[in-house]
Image: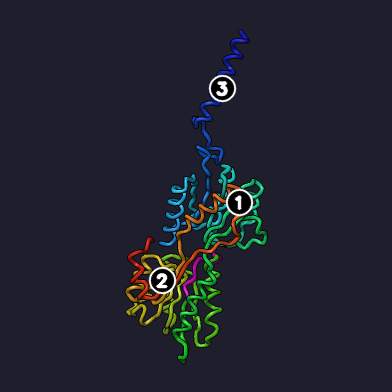
């Protein structure tokens, strides 16, 4: 009788193993997907702008095209949500973690947890200020300081040889975010070459169109003479345009406007002359990210800093490029 039970038990174990090997078992506690798929855990900042929406779509579409299983988490603009998501990815034992940090500081503890778990981390779009660069394998994104410099240089060129103070108001991105810090620095360093160019007001618009409008309304009420608006992204600039028009002024003429991103709505405003100059910051990082994920998973070592290719646009260039814009 015992012998018969033992044979039955062995058979049950073998059957269970066979079912698990065919994908019949529940693998929710592990990051390993079916057919040995690479599993990528990605934590997104949120959906604060058209740029971010395009960035999310690029990552989702590229993961699908690359055959990579994507576990996606939206942080809704909160660092604590990203930290929770990253810890969840660690618990799920994903193969690679990637995220676009809400702010630059406060990541060392959770990144060390990922490192201790043997899960490589890739930063996308935004950097962190950690002194221990071994906590992540690569950073894919734009040079935000260079973007600020390009914006500033256009303005310097516009007012070259002219006299009189030029009053500039600045709509900053989210406080503590890498693009906000770096775009402000690059711009300020560049316009310092012309003492007539002065930033008279600078305030966060949190990268959103609604806040851009609200803050610009405040600027217009408190500052009688505004010559130039520098917005850290298109969406804030577009919100500011609404406020400028409501105040009876003509955007692009009465107030020159410089923005960063080059999303379709921004490019449309540029082609119409409501924005004067846009510095591109491409959101289409998905294909490059998937290449890095595959490289890391296969044991390769990607470059520590990988830049995206970007340009700038004037009104005429926007008219030519706009029909081809993907986002």
Q: Nearer the viewer, residue 60 or 308?
A: 308
Element carrying mark 3: helix
Image coords of residue 182 (percent x, y): 55, 70
Q: Residues within 10 Å of mark 2 (few under 14, many from 20)?
A: many
Which residue: 34% across, 73% down? 271
Which residue: 35% across, 75% down? 316
Q: Which residues lie in the magenta part? A: 170-177
Q: Nearer the viewer, residue 11 or 259?
A: 11
Element carrying mark 1: loop
Image coords of residue 105 (percent x, y): 60, 61
Location of mark 1 (residue): 300
Q: Nearer the viewer, residue 240 or 318?
A: 318
Instruction: Report how far apart the C-alphas of labels 1 and 2 lie in the structure.
Output: 41 Å
Which residue: 45% across, 61% down? 283
Image coords of residue 238 (percent x, y): 38, 70
Q: Tell me which label, 1 or 2, sits earlier in the chain.
A: 2
Location of mark 2 (residue): 237
Based on the picture, tell me whether residue 228 belongs to the magenta stretch.
no
Q: Residues within 10 Å of mark 3 (few under 14, many from 20)?
A: few
Task: Give residue 235's mark.
Answer: none
Instruction: Report how far apart the C-alphas of labels 1 and 3 lie in the structure.
Output: 37 Å
Q: Nearer the viewer, residue 168 or 293?
A: 293
Q: Tell me which label, 1 or 3, sits earlier in the chain.
A: 3
Location of mark 3 (residue): 14
250 left or right of 172 in image: left
Q: Quadrant of the C terminus?
A: bottom left
Image coords of residue 318 (percent x, y): 36, 71
In this picture, is 91 found above or below 233?
A: above
């Amino acid at each position: 009788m015992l012998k018969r039970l033992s044979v039955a038990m062995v058979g049950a174990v073998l059957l269970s193993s066979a079912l698990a090997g065919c994908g019949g078992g529940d693998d929710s506690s592990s990051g390993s997907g079916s057919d040995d798929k690479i599993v990528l855990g990605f934590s997104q900042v949120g959906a604060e702008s058209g740029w971010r929406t395009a960035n999310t779509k690029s990552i989702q579409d590229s993961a699908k095209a690359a055959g990579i299983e994507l576990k996606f988490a939206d942080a809704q603009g909160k660092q604590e949500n990203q930290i929770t998501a990253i810890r969840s990815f660690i618990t799920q034992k994903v193969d690679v973690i990637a995220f676009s940090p809400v702010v630059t500081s406060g990541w060392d503890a959770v990144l060390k947890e990922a490192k201790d778990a043997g899960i490589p981390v890739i930063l996308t779009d935004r950097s962190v200020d950690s002194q221990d660069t071994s906590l992540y394998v690569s950073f894919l994104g734009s040079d935000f300081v260079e973007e600020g410099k390009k914006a500033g240089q256009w303005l310097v060129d516009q007012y070259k040889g002219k006299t009189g103070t030029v009053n500039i108001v600045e709509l900053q991105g989210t406080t503590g975010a890498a693009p906000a810090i770096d775009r402000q620095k690059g711009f300020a360093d560049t316009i310092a070459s012309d003492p007539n160019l002065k930033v008279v007001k600078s305030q966060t618009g949190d990268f959103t169109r609604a806040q851009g409008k609200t803050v610009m309304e405040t600027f217009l009420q408190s500052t009688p003479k505004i010559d130039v608006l520098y917005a850290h992204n298109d969406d804030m600039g577009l919100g500011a345009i609404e406020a400028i028009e409501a105040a009876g002024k003509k955007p692009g003429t009465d107030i020159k406007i410089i923005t960063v991103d080059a999303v379709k709505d921004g490019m449309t405003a540029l082609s119409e002359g409501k924005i004067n100059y846009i510095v591109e910051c491409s959101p289409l990082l998905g294909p490059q990210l998937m290449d890095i994920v595959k490289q890391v998973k296969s044991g390769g070592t990607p470059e520590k800093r990988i830049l995206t290719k970007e340009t700038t646009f004037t009104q005429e260039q926007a008219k030519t490029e706009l029909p081809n814009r993907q986002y």
